[in-house]
Image (spheres, rainbow, N blue to C red):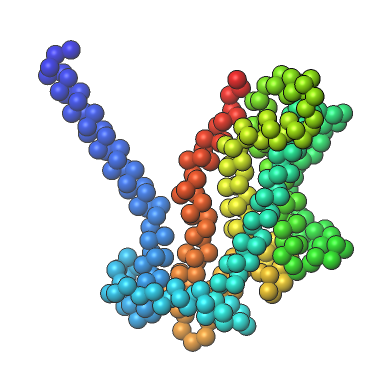
Amino acid sequence: MSNVAKRQTSTLDKVLRVALYATLLSVAFIYLAPFLVMLLTSLKDVEEIRTGTLLSLPGSLNLDAWSKAWSSACTGGQCEGIGPYFMNSFQIVLPAVAISTLLGALNGYVISHWKFKGSDLFFAALLVGCFIPFQVILLPMARTLGWLGIANTTTGLVFVHVVYGVAFTTLFFRNFYQSIPGELVKAARLDGAGFFTIFWRIILPVSTPIIVVTVIWQFTQIWNDFLFGVAFSGFDTQPVTVALNNLVNTSFGGKQYNVDMAAAIIAALPTLVVYVLAGKYFVRGLTAGSVKG
């Protein structure tokens, strides 16, 4: 290839690269524009919101709306902000994620390497749980929570999310464990290792990628849940999503959009942080078990 042709090819590559990056930046801006509007609005006072535009910068850094959203905004009859409900969500999410992940790992391990009569039917029945709409189980779950004596409690919400989430976690772990050679488990059994010994010392140590996937999936699903929260929580056990809805729909005097936006960002921060810090591991975990061997 001549020098002229090489230069033309190099110039074309640069143009295509610039066009690609320009397109990606444009799409990213469009995608992030709602969040930018929320952030700018939360930093303005009410007068600036009325007189300015959506993308106008605040005249000064004003965090009053954030403070009010956290500690003194009215969410119905109470004016204590979303702070207590934010902590309620953590009390629900952390045990629910841990329990559903552990149960999913055990189920996936059994279905993959300790098959029993009817195990395939059991797995198929679990899969059905992945496609059942939330609304279908509201009444049966309410009866169950009442029978167990944990209705309107944090424990009840943990129970609900574990029951609904275990179908997904089992699916994730089962598909991942299918890529682990069965000969490895058989050899351990021949050496005298039992069910839990194999699980804790052989299976679990190689499960980091799929554990990350499951934790991220369950954390975001449970944290962002509204339907179960509004249906099964009491006044003092409501998650942050329910409190946010109540805050947005409660107003005394003029509407304070800056407080609403600040509260919405605060409610979304945990899932945002999880995806920013562990997003790449989520993708790696999803593909880790896709190729056997």
Q: Is residue 221 left or right of residue 34?
A: right
Name of the residue lying farthest toward the top: 1
Q: Is residue 196 left or right of residue 251?
A: right
| Residue at 64% over, 57% down | 93
Q: Quadrant of the N terminus?
A: top left
Tell me where residue 152 sits by quadrant. Answer: bottom right
| Residue at 76% over, 62% down | 156
State the residue in front, 46 or 107: 107
Q: Is residue 231 visible?
A: no
Looking at the image, residue 134 lies above or below residue 178? below
Q: Position of residue 140 (x, y in %)?
A: 82, 58
Q: Quadrant of the C terminus?
A: top right
Q: Position of residue 185 (x, y in %)?
A: 73, 24
| Residue at 32% over, 42% down | 23
Looking at the image, residue 291 lies above or below residue 156? above
Looking at the image, residue 143 lies above or below residue 9? below
| Residue at 61% over, 61% down | 90
State the residue in front, 1 or 189: 189
